[in-house]
Image: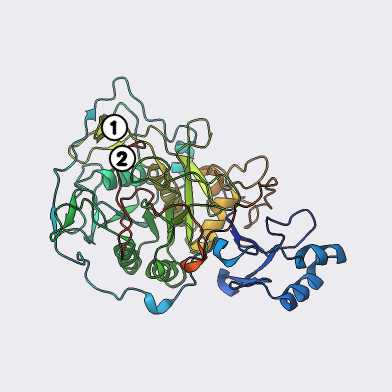
Amino acid sequence: MAVRWSACGRVRRGVVRQALAGKTPPGGKADDLVVRPGGRRDRRSVCGRSGWNRAAVTRAVLRVATATAVVLLTSAQCAAPALAVIPPAVDNSLLPPPSPPAPPQPTQQHEACAVPMSIDGADVSATQLRGFDMPAVWRLTRGAGQRVAVVDTGIAAHRRLPGVIAGGDYVSSGDGRQDCDGHGTAVAGIISAAPDRTDQTGFSGVAPEATLIAIRQSSNKFGPLTDPSTRGFGDVSTLAMAVRTAADMGASVINVSSVACAESLDDRALGAALSYAVDVKDAVVVAAAGNVGGDGQCPSQNTTAQPTVIASPAWYDDYVLTVASVGPGGTPSPFSLNGPWVDVAAPGEHVISLDPDGDGVIDTMPTPAGQASMSGTSYATPVVSGLVALVRSRFPRLSARQVMARIETTAHHPAEGWNAAVGNGVVDPLAALSDHTAGTSPPDPRPSAPPPPSRPAPDRPYGVAATGAALCLAGLVAAASVRLRRRQEDVPAD
């Protein structure tokens, strides 16, 4: 179950918060979460976004708690607004207008395109889906009838990705079906690469009959024409436009494997685009949790209940299904960014996918230090996007929010309940596709007592406390934008 620690307590997707003794989060305050008709969620905080209100606290506590709970909930422990781990309120007036995809400024290619090394599969096998009973899954559905938008570095032509729809290009003059970085093609392959009996690795996409929409939104190989020294193009503004475009093109699933990690950023247009995609167009947005370590990654790991690093779009938890990475045994990947917005996890280490520069498969990407294994939350995310396509194909009457809840509910829950590393646990495709899935709300997580919150930071825009203005999977924070670049150090090709 997705969980967010707000300034005054904890907000959970799809259920009403009950302020019971022993379940009060850090800060000692509890939020009421009201499910609106149609599945939309509304947070009615007993503390409020701009400071706690004693009368509101008292009224809420009298409804749900004992006299002892009243004392606990009204004590002056509510964190300062600067520690609120909530995104800015959605402002629909900031939704990008519909327009043909194009770079917001002139660009040029600054580096040669990536050329990964193909493998023949003689001594390599695809293991990413090994923990799932995919033959049983594919007997139920293969994702037919679903459009999955890949908002990434583009999708190169490949014989195992037939019928890719051109979604547009925010980097150059293409139509989305070009990929100079290779990242978007690898993501696309994990979602829906067709099986190939000649491929000795056994690699296949999760939903091989789903249709892909290719939208190039970012690239490390391009930059602004006016600044040849700048490497990388694409920011939260172009991401917002790309999400709007994907939704308008009828995508039932939108895969976003780019993450902005920053101390403060103006991503309100992205929030509006996510709200539009989910609540107007009924699309499921699946987003990467982000990677930790190295230049261009998130600056540090979140190790306490109060995060010090935020990730966008992941922190828009009401609107996205955020995916963490695990290793082959289900152990959380050390590079996967923890956070209260993490919903589920999927395998994301040492993956195999399609070659963007050939017709075979690859298991490495070029880095400054040479070829390196492909690992990252970017590669865990398309596993879940493929699963969403399967669920929507098998149960077409489910809304976007119902699909999200179903995938969380059927995941392999950690023994202690939800946690910030894997959320509700590793996804279970066969359970998510079962006719006998019980319930629509994940079980109540039981987080262990966290360490005391760190000292409050100075007030910052949108109430975000963080330690550094860095970007997960990205470059540097520019004055007016946050770039969504993927650097190749430490966690390769993510």
Residues under numbered marks 2 and 1 in contact, where contact means CB atoms less than 8 Å apart: yes
Q: Nearer the viewer, residue 483 or 343?
A: 483
Give residue 210's position: percent from left, percent from top: 35, 52
Kindly identify the residue that appears in the image at 36 percent across and 37 percent down. Answer: 491
Q: Quadrant of residue 40?
A: bottom right
Task: Estimate how packed mark 1 is, as few (under 14), some (14 to 19) or many (20 or more) residues with alpha carbons within 10 Å.
Answer: many
Alpha carbon distance from label 2 to label 1: 8 Å
9 shown above or below 51: above
Q: Nearer the viewer, residue 304 or 456?
A: 456
Is 482 left, or right, of 397 in this rendering? left
Kindly identify the residue that appears in the image at 31 percent across and 63 percent down. Answer: 481
| Residue where numbered disc 1 is placed | 364
Q: Secondary structure at mark 1?
A: strand
| Numbered disc total | 2
Q: Secondary structure at mark 2?
A: loop
Task: Estimate how packed mark 2 is, as few (under 14), some (14 to 19) or many (20 or more) residues with alpha carbons within 10 Å.
Answer: many
Q: Quadrant of the C terminus?
A: top left
Is 26 left, or right, of 382 in this rendering? right
The reply to whether residue 116 is visible in this rendering is yes
| Residue where numbered disc 2 is placed | 493
Earlier in the chain: of badge 2 and badge 1, it is 1
Amino acid type shown at disc 1: Thr
Give residue 286's position: percent from left, percent from top: 43, 55
